[in-house]
Image: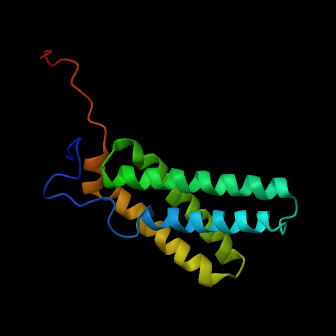
Amino acid sequence: MGSRSGGPASGQANVADGAGPQRRPLSVSLAAAAQAIEAAQGKSYQSSSGIALTAIGAGTAVGLALAALGLARVRRWSRTPALLTQLFVGIVGIYLVQGHRYWLGGPALALSVAGLVLLLVPPSLRALAFVAKDPAAPAK
């Protein structure tokens, strides 16, 4: 199991390897920055909606960065946001494929499936699983 101070113990796969969420905070941050520029230039439909979209994008980028950091440090709490992110990306990928935008939906689906597989392989499950204490065991 991973130690509290850092990465996984020897012999275990790092759950942050592969097509994980580390690239998403940057792309979401760039989208939020582009929205902020459009809002500042007055190109948004309403300035209040441009500001709100910027805040939502920035908040999402921070949340995804925290989830990626938690995965890199093998923290149990990071599994749920990472799985939900992969699920959401898969749903968006299906929507894009149904809209005949295969060049966007195909990679989104592939990354979503790869992320789900990497989060659900046995080494990742062992590293991120909650180990219940035996209530019958004597207290130390």
Q: How is the image coloured?
A: rainbow
Q: Residue furthest top?
A: 139
Q: Is residue 24 left or right of residue 51?
A: left
In this orientation, which residue lies closer to the viewer: 46 or 113? 46
Q: Quadrant of residue 50?
A: bottom right
Q: Quadrant of residue 132?
A: top left
Q: Residue furthest front?
A: 41
* Left or right placement of residue 65 versus residue 45 in this view: left
Q: Is residue 71 above or below residue 133?
A: below
Could you say where residue 60 lies in the image, as x and y percent from the top left? 59, 54
**Whole-percent x, y for residue 64 in the image:** 50, 55
Q: What's the residue at 67%, 74% (across, down)?
A: 96
Percent x, y of residue 95 = 67, 69
Q: How many marks?
A: 0
Name which residue lies at 45% across and 62% down.
Answer: 21
Indicate whether 17 appears above or below 100: above
The residue furthest bottom is: 103
Q: What percent of the width, then of the height, locates residue 52?
A: 75, 52
Q: Is residue 16 left or right of residue 23?
A: left
- Which residue does the image show at 69% across and 75% down from the upper left? 98
Closest to the observer, 66 or 17: 66
